[in-house]
């Protein structure tokens, strides 16, 4: 029976960040201090968001998982790669981070053995 196939939801582990105070160097000594908060400007790393950038090097609409910075200039990982340095004012939250990474793929064609 040939017909349209619906997309399949694929989930994977994405984590929920770390609770560490410093970043160690290769010998294990503290190298730099980490920020005390995981959320900045209402966003957390792992949130799904859409960024509409009107002008500049990163102009366009980007949808994906964001990585936050305390400066307010975030990275967004899309299906086409990483877009760096997008201001927090350009984002619109789609889904809060829950520790999973979501994507869709087309349903595979199965063959019947009988």
Image (tube, rainbow, N blue to C red):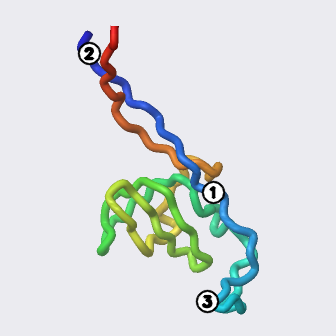
Residue lying farthest to the front in this orientation? 113
The first of marks 3 and 2 along the sequence is 2
Secondary structure found at label 1: loop
| Left or right of 23 in this view: 53 | left
Question: Where, by quadrant of the figure, is residue 14 drawn?
Answer: bottom right
Q: Whole-percent x and y of residue 21? A: 75, 80
Q: Whole-percent x and y of residue 98? A: 64, 49
Which quadrant does the N terminus fall into? top left
Which residue: 37% across, 25% down?
6
Q: Which residue is mark 1?
A: 15
Q: Which residue is mark 2?
A: 3
Rate crowding at label 2 as few (under 14), some (14 to 19) or many (20 or more) other CA atoms within 10 Å: few
Q: Which residue is mark 3?
A: 26
Which residue: 32% across, 58% down?
80
Q: Are marks 3 and 2 in contact (CB under 8 Å)?
A: no
Which residue: 37% across, 37% down?
105
Secondary structure found at label 3: loop
Q: Whole-percent x and y of residue 32? A: 67, 89
Residue lying farthest to the top in this orientation? 114
The first of marks 1 and 2 along the sequence is 2
Which residue: 51% across, 75% down?
73
């Amino acid at each position: 029976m040939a017909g349209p196939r619906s997309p399949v939801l694929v989930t994977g582990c994405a984590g929920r960040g770390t609770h560490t105070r410093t970043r160690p160097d290769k010998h294990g000594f503290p190298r730099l201090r980490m920020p005390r908060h995981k959320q900045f400007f209402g966003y957390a790393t792992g949130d799904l968001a859409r960024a509409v950038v009107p002008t500049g090097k990163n102009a366009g609409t980007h949808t994906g998982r964001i990585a936050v910075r305390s400066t307010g200039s975030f990275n967004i990982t899309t299906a086409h790669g990483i877009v760096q340095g997008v201001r927090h004012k350009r984002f619109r939250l789609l889904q809060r981070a829950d520790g999973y990474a979501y994507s869709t793929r087309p349903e595979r064609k199965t063959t019947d053995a009988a």
